[in-house]
């Protein structure tokens, strides 16, 4: 049946596939409409922010349609990640790019022609290379998905010349629908995507660019390290990125974090490709908790469990800032973005963005930097400001930024403004912000004394206020138009007409007081203690402990299979497991993010961990519950009525039954344990040196085949690679046993 005459697959089938393969109950807003459009054979353009859920928009149509969806993706690393994630969900997918050898490419090509594949990822270079289009005509292509479609536009920041040739697809495949996806929404890019891909009356879906789960915070740039350590201590184990301006800062910050016992790494363009790949890999695998990086880091990173992003320095513009914070909370779980802000940063950044560029560009860069500065100094909902920048109106305040959470209070600031204006006037309007504050606060430093500012009448007139308060107020006066900055005169503050009016008492001034900024500056001893206690309590709650345990299990499984932990399950899925504590098949499958395949692969292990953790939720957990054997109701089909899933002592019992000659199935049956549990017992015993009847699980030729594969793959290969390489012929239990045997040397 050709694609044109095929009956449209219903959205119900799509929803069932979403549940079955991804374990999600519902589509997110727009996903359903997008999927319907593409299933209806329409060319479709999708503009959605990072983490919005673009992948599902073409993966689900691919799964429910006949034929192969060809995905064009510009980044090799991302391709690998996506294919791994698809496989983990039980969807047959592969990729072909320069990293894939000829014979493997041939195998994949055969699988595509035979219709065995659902998704085939290719790099644009590969797609456009000799003979590839020709080959594709032999494949039943269900649709083309062009990921990161903004790469087609020379206006954008990721322009890729190869992408401009993708227009040829339409000539070769006039009736195959094309779906183009990007997280860049500007008008020019949109237009380029439509025209260059030769899309035919495409349906365009522009979703909101809001990322409501990211808590937006701006903090004064004092004691940045202290503030960072404080935050990390409150969020133990949570992965985060710290963006710094310079390579040097990356290295020193990472070093300082390491000295405090934090698993931190760094990443910047000055490192060799190998060093960079290693740093990135460790971060993806959760071996590094914090990565301190220049903005070179992050492109092509799919890690969904980045829980926070910090900007050690002010970003150049809002586009960059938004893209960088967008790497937090892709799984939809709570995330935090913290920006450290100081005026000194604005000054150095200003020099940077205007140096060695044509004047027009310098003006544009400066204007963009000023928007960034306005955002950092804002006294109203930050998310509204951000979204306004992207021409979107939130309609109301967000409730999830520092301003919304801790609204500033307004007071009559006329007197304070007069003090500042007067001090500036008496210093001949020659001083910049910092020096003005020093004068007001009566500081005796060199800059003050050198010019005799300690002789001014206003010297010390504001000594009752801390530095940071003055800092905030003077900025508000700037924003209010009482001062302006003469950049060409060493950033001196100049009094405006409006400022003169205030000075003469003709105009009142209202100022805002920020609570958070003050607290964040120097946490008091009591504050530090309270924070530490709060963190400890939260971390000590039964739910938090279970989450931690599940996180460790996830890490172990991920390492064994050589995939990143978030490919096993996302943080949000683990959180839900910790909350709901599912101990049956049905309950586990109802957790968002647990599809059929993942249940089959990991379900038992996670159920076991939950059972071992303590009584189910309804029963209040005792403190020692962790160490007590517990017998919760286990209603999985594979469990016997005895339900004797008792921790400890059980390994020996399994070995005993194995010695008596019982098969795996019989032991599972008799003991009322999950298969994976029994297998785990056998593996551990075997690793400890206890002999098993190995041939019951592996023949000599199996062992030889596995050993040969291992040798071929080399020492760096994980179990998962082995599993794939052997075309899933052996299960993980068999592969692990073979591995232990190789280590034992017999
Ligand atoms: P994008 O490609 O737009 O950056 P992804 O496709 O990686 O986003 O999706 C981000 C996260 O949201 C992933 O963890 C994905 O599994 C999850 N997700 C996507 N669609 C849904 C849905 N309908 N329900 C729940 N989670 C979803
Ligand atoms: Zn807000």
Image: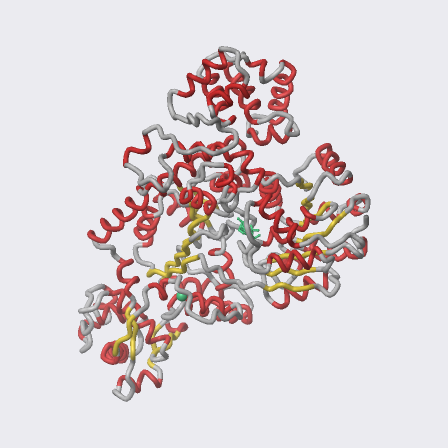
Q: Which residue is drawn at 69% across and 43% down?
A: 118
Name the residue furthest front. 641
In this rendering, the count of numbered labels is 0
The quadrant of the picture occupied by the C terminus is top right
- Give residue 88's position: percent from left, percent from top: 58, 38
Quadrant of residue 442 within the rendered picture: bottom left
Q: Toward the viewer: 193 or 120?
A: 120
- Give residue 560's position: percent from left, percent from top: 51, 30
On screen, residue 630 versus residue 415, left or right, reads right
Q: Which residue is drawn at 56% across and 19% down?
A: 738
Q: In this view, does 89 lie above or below 327?
A: above
Q: Toward the viewer: 66 or 711?
A: 66
Q: By what rule are the colours in the image chosen? A: secondary structure
* Quadrant field for ligand 2: bottom left
Quick check: can you spot residue 555?
no
Q: Toward the viewer: 673 or 264?
A: 673
Q: Toward the viewer: 171 or 619?
A: 619
Q: In this view, does 37 lie above or below 581?
A: below
- Give residue 347's position: percent from left, percent from top: 40, 65
On screen, residue 709 versus residue 362, left or right, reads right
Q: In this view, does 229 lie above or below 610?
A: below
């Amino acid at each position: 049946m050709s694609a044109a005459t095929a009956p449209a697959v219903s959205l119900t089938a799509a929803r069932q596939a979403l549940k079955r393969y991804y374990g999600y109950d519902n589509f997110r807003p727009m996903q359903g409409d997008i999927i319907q459009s593409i299933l209806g054979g329409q060319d479709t353009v999708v503009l959605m922010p990072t983490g919005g859920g673009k992948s599902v928009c073409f993966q689900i149509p691919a799964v429910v349609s006949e034929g192969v969806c060809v995905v064009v993706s510009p980044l090799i690393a991302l391709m690998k990640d996506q294919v791994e994630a698809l496989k983990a969900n039980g969807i047959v997918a592969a990729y072909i790019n320069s990293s894939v050898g000829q014979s493997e490419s041939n195998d994949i090509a055969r699988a595509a022609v035979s219709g065995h594949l659902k998704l085939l990822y290719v790099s644009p270079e590969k797609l456009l290379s000799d003979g590839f289009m020709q080959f594709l005509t032999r494949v039943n292509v269900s649709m083309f998905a062009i990921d990161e479609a903004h790469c087609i536009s020379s206006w954008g920041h990721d322009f890729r010349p190869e992408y401009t040739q993708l227009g040829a697809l339409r000539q070769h495949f006039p009736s195959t629908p094309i779906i183009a996806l990007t997280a860049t929404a500007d008008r020019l890019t949109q237009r380029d995507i439509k025209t260059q891909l030769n899309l035919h009356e495409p349906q365009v879906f522009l979703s909101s660019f809001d990322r409501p789960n990211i808590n937006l915070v701006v903090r004064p740039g004092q004691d940045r390290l202290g503030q960072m350590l404080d935050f990390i201590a409150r969020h133990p184990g949570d992965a985060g990125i710290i963006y710094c301006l310079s390579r040097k800062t990356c290295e020193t910050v990472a070093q300082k974090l390491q000295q405090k016992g934090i698993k931190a790494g760094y990443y910047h363009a000055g490192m060799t490709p190998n060093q960079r790949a290693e740093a990135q890999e460790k971060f993806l695998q959760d071996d590094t908790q914090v990565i301190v990086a220049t903005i070179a880091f992050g492109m092509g990173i799919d890690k969904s469990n980045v829980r926070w992003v910090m900007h050690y320095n002010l970003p150049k513009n809002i586009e960059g800032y938004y893209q960088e914070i967008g790497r937090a909370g892709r799984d939809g779980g709570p995330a935090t973005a913290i920006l450290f802000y100081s005026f000194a940063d604005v000054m150095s950044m200003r020099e940077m963005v205007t140096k060695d560029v044509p004047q027009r560009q310098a003006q544009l860069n400066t204007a963009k930097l000023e928007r960034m500065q306005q955002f950092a100094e804002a006294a109203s909902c930050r998310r509204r400001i951000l979204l306004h920048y992207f021409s979107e109106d939130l309609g109301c305040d967000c409730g999830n930024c520092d301003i919304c959470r801790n609204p500033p209070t307004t007071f009559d600031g006329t007197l304070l403004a007069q003090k500042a204006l007067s001090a500036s006037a008496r210093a001949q309007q020659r001083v910049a912000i910092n020096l003005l504050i020093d004068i007001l606060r009566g500081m005796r430093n060199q800059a003050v004394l050198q010019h005799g500012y300690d002789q001014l009448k206003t010297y010390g007139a504001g000594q009752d206020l801390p530095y940071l308060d003055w800092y905030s107020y003077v900025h508000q006066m700037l924003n209010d138009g009482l001062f302006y900055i003469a950049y060409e005169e060493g950033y001196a503050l100049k009094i405006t007409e409006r400022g003169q009016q205030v000075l003469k008492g003709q105009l009142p001034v209202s100022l805002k007081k920020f609570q958070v900024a003050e607290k964040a500056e120097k946490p008091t001893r009591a504050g530090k203690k309270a924070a530490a206690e709060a963190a400890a309590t939260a971390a000590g709650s039964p739910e938090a402990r279970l989450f931690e345990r599940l996180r460790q299990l996830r890490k172990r499984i991920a390492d064994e299979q050589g995939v990143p932990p978030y490919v096993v399950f996302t943080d949000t899925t683990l959180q839900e497991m910790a909350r709901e504590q599912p101990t049956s098949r049905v309950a586990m499958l109802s957790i968002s993010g647990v599809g059929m395949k993942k249940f089959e692969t990991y379900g038992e292990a996670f159920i076991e961990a939950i059972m071992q953790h303590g009584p189910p939720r309804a029963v209040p957990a005792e403190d020692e519950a962790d160490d007590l054997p517990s017998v919760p109701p286990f209603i999985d089909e594979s469990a016997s009525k005895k339900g004797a899933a008792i921790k400890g002592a059980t390994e020996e019992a399994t070995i005993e039954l194995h010695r008596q000659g019982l098969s795996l199935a019989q032991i599972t049956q008799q003991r009322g344990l999950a298969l994976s549990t029994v297998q785990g017992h056998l593996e551990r015993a075997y690793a400890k040196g206890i002999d098993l009847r190995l041939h019951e699980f592996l023949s000599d030729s199996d062992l030889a085949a596995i050993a040969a594969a291992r040798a071929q793959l080399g020492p760096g290969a994980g179990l998962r690679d082995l599993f794939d390489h052997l075309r899933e012929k052996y299960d993980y239990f068999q592969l692990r046993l073979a591995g232990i045997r190789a280590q034992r040397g017999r």
